[in-house]
Amino acid sequence: MTKSQLATTLLVALATVAGCSMPRPVASLGEVRQASADGRIQLVPVTAASLPAAPSAVSTFPAEYMAAQPVDYELLGAGDVLKVRVWESGTPTLFVSNGGDLGDVVVDESGRLYLPHVGSIQAAGRTIAQVRAEVGARLRTMVRGPQVDIRPGELRSKLVSVQGNAAKGGTYTIERGRTRLGELLGEVAPDLKNPEMLEVTLRRDGRTGTVRLADLHRNPALDIALRPGDAIVLNEVIEHVTVLGAAGIQGQVRIAEREYSVTDILGQARGLSPDTADPRAVFLIRSEPGAATPTVYQFEMRRPETVALAGRFIVRDKDALLISNASFAQTRQILSAVSQSLGTVRSAVTVTP
């Protein structure tokens, strides 16, 4: 093949390259508009009128949680363990064989406590002082000057549990200084790196209530009274928006706050690529519950008012932010391919005998 023939062949290939469009990683503005015209998506240009309402940023507990009164932690209940000791100051003696130490005594399921020589007495719903007084009164009919000491062991009738993102999770007793949710959380040391994104879930009597830790700190009404059997779970809220196309970086971007906006996501993604992005074609894609087609919100980022609206547009978990390539970027790709091919032609013509 002569130089002339080789050059002609390569130029024909070059023309073919120039006539073809280069592949794109994401849809162009025209393709998105066509998808809307075909009914495959619902395209919504973002304006002050079309801006979706921001979700409520304040969380709260069910009304019955808020209305519950603090537990009287001094009252005994079924399952409580008491440590009982009796001293006798005269004769006859009833407890000399064990030195008066009756060990751990459990309040049974019926709420009653059984002691040797004393019998069964009602303990549930009464204080330790009241139980001690009754035990002493019964013993005085049998021994002289009995001294009764009853101390709490494990108060199982007033247990609550804490799990999740806490340094000191486990089981705790409702007692003095630990009757409300805030007091308990102060002891278990939850992860405080981002209270806005830490959920406090409380399960009680088959129901569940969830608030954000930041709301609990701000609103004293959420510092609800603890009830026996409460189960508290602390969970970090992990949500993402997927960024695609002509952004500084692509991939999943973490939602760092509840009121996180399109502008915040773009900031984390290092903004629009100055070399390739089409500022007219910034799209947020959202699948609304029950909707037949996804909603695609279009941001015309050349307009300052739209940039301001992007700062008010609150993103949701699993939203996708798509930034189309500009047409000049496509042309640049083609010209780059042509330039490379011309270099190949030049080299081939030079070396061909």
Image (spheres, rainbow, N blue to C red):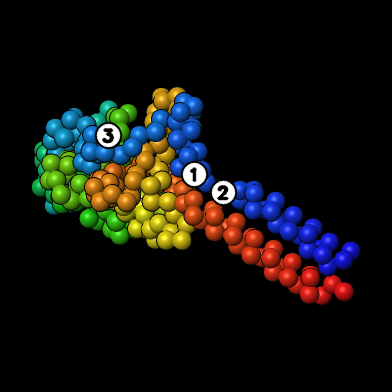
Residue at point 45%, 35% (across, down)? 33
The CA distance from mark 3 to mark 2 is 29 Å
Mark 1 vs mark 3: which is more N-terminal? 1
- Residue 77 position, x and y percent, is 23, 35
Are the residues tagged 3 and 2 within 8 Å (C-beta)? no
Amino acid type of disc 2? Arg
- Locate the C terminus by quadrant: bottom right
Is label 3 in a helix, a strand or a loop?
loop
Amino acid type of disc 1? Ser
Q: Quick one: label 1, few (<14), some, or many (20+) residues within 10 Å?
A: some
The nearer-to-camera label among 3 and 2 is 2
Residue at point 18%, 51% (across, down)? 217
Total marks placed: 3
Residue 28's tag is 1
Q: Quick one: label 2, few (<14), some, or many (20+) residues within 10 Å?
A: few
Residue 228's tag is none
Pointer 2 residue: 24
Amino acid type of disc 3? Ser
- Residue 323 position, x and y percent, is 44, 49
The CA distance from mark 1 to mark 3 is 22 Å
Are the residues tagged 1 and 2 within 8 Å (C-beta)? yes
**297 and 159: which one is in front?**
297
Q: Is residue 337 visible?
A: yes
